[in-house]
Image: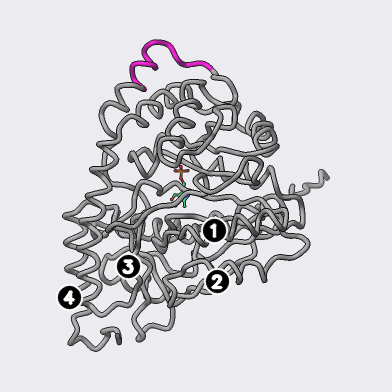
Amino acid sequence: MVKHITPRLNRRVAELRASGIRRIVDAAAHRDAAGQPVYAFHLGEPDFDTPEPIKKAAIAKLQEGQVHYTPNAGIPELRSAVAHDLYFRYQASVDPSQVLITVGSCEALSLALLAVLDVGDEVLVPTPCWPNYLQLPKLIGAHAIQVPLAPNTGFSIDPAQLEQAITPRTRALLINSPNNPTGNVISRSTLETLIELARSYGLWLIIDEIYQDIVFDGAEHISPFSLVRPGDPLIHIGGFSKSYAMTGWRIGYAVAMNDAFSAMLKAHQYLVTSATSFVQWGALEALSQAASRASMRNTYQLRYHLVEKALEQAGFRFTPPQGAFYVFARIPDAYPNSEAFCLEMLTEHGLGFVPGDVFGDAHADHFRLCFACATDELRAGLQKLSDIFHPSSERSNTK
Ligand code: PLP
């Protein structure tokens, strides 16, 4: 008799936690399919269409026959334009040869971690954070060390707290500003201290600035590019998804200092060869669309004000975001945890929120509301929330 042996799967992949956001997305899709509407406050995706000139530029290049591999690091025109854009914004002295065009900023982040982490190494991640930061290091056999930030500081990074978490295995600090999910923008003085920490402990400072264009009410996004010296161990992650409503195009970039660039390029060559040819031309056009990105930012700001008013009236506690398009609010006291709260909101009221512990183990008393959905949907969903948590209601929060 022939013996059948079941092949086994990779253990590191088995250890990845299923995306908590996906769980809510799937439950929402189920509800939607059953004809019950869902207010999609759980998705971190702009509702806008990609601006027309960007589409036209990509279509023109596609029709022209730009359908082949491009140079591995990206088309020279886009690499130069990214370097110029960063100079224009931050007076960053970035050479185009340090710019790597990637398949979304997701790939840029994966490459950065692949380039700097070995098996058993640690990367410090202040939480709440975008969930990928906690899972990706596992693929390399490395560890994301969560450094939970305090809600009463608006989840601001405390460099002393990060310094205490450094061990001989620490290789990198991974930060995000403006932050998903809190909207916190890292201050100049904190960034200066973090750069100093990276220098003195020999760590890479990896910063994800994908929300750099979306800041509110006079807040200023400071990039480490304005503060670093040549030779500093910086890797910047950037992208087009959020600023230009290009999530489905899958295009982003990294700027990597010192020898990180060639390490990331090597990994990128084997993983994807190059980003999609005509998409890179669309991204090039995007960088000249300052008016479109400003108009989207203004709309996010207006939407935030609607959210702020509704959440305050319903008695929710939260720190106003300075950027991105999320509010990270405390769950009402009547609920045991965020999962229970989000599940009830979705199944009973069609309100899609993401439980706080998806963004770090210490945050199960919070939930994330995304206001990148259409303004009408936002208004209707907020009305629903106000109806449930009217100040006179029993389940109302305590302020
Ligand atoms: N970085 C952060 C902080 C995000 O929130 C997201 C998406 O939600 C990404 C990166 C992914 O961006 P991209 O679409 O460029 O891969």
**Dot placed on the residue nearer the N-terminal end, 3 or 4:** 3
Q: Residue 148 carries which label?
A: 2
Tag 3–tag 1 contact (CB < 8 Å)? no
**Dot placed on the residue nearer the N-terminal end, 3 or 2:** 2
Which of labels 2 and 4 is toward the front? 2
Q: Considering the image in quadrants, where does the N terminus appear?
A: top right
**Dot placed on the residue nearer the N-terminal end, 1 or 4:** 1
Residue ID for mark 3: 320
Residue ID for mark 1: 18
Mark 3 falls on what kind of element? loop
Mark 1 falls on what kind of element? loop
* Separation of residues labelled 3 and 1 (CA atoms): 29 Å
**Dot placed on the residue nearer the N-terminal end, 3 or 1:** 1
Q: At 19% from the left edge and 84% from the top edge, which residue is drawn?
A: 391
Q: Position of residue 382 (x, y in %)?
A: 21, 66
Residue 28, above or below 153: above
* Separation of residues labelled 2 and 4 (CA atoms): 33 Å
Mark 4 falls on what kind of element? helix
Q: Considering the image in quadrants, where does the C terminus appear?
A: bottom left
Residue ID for mark 4: 387
Tag 1–tag 4 contact (CB < 8 Å)? no
Which of labels 3 and 4 is toward the front? 3
Residue 230, above or below 117: above
Q: Does the magenta segment cover residue 61?
A: yes
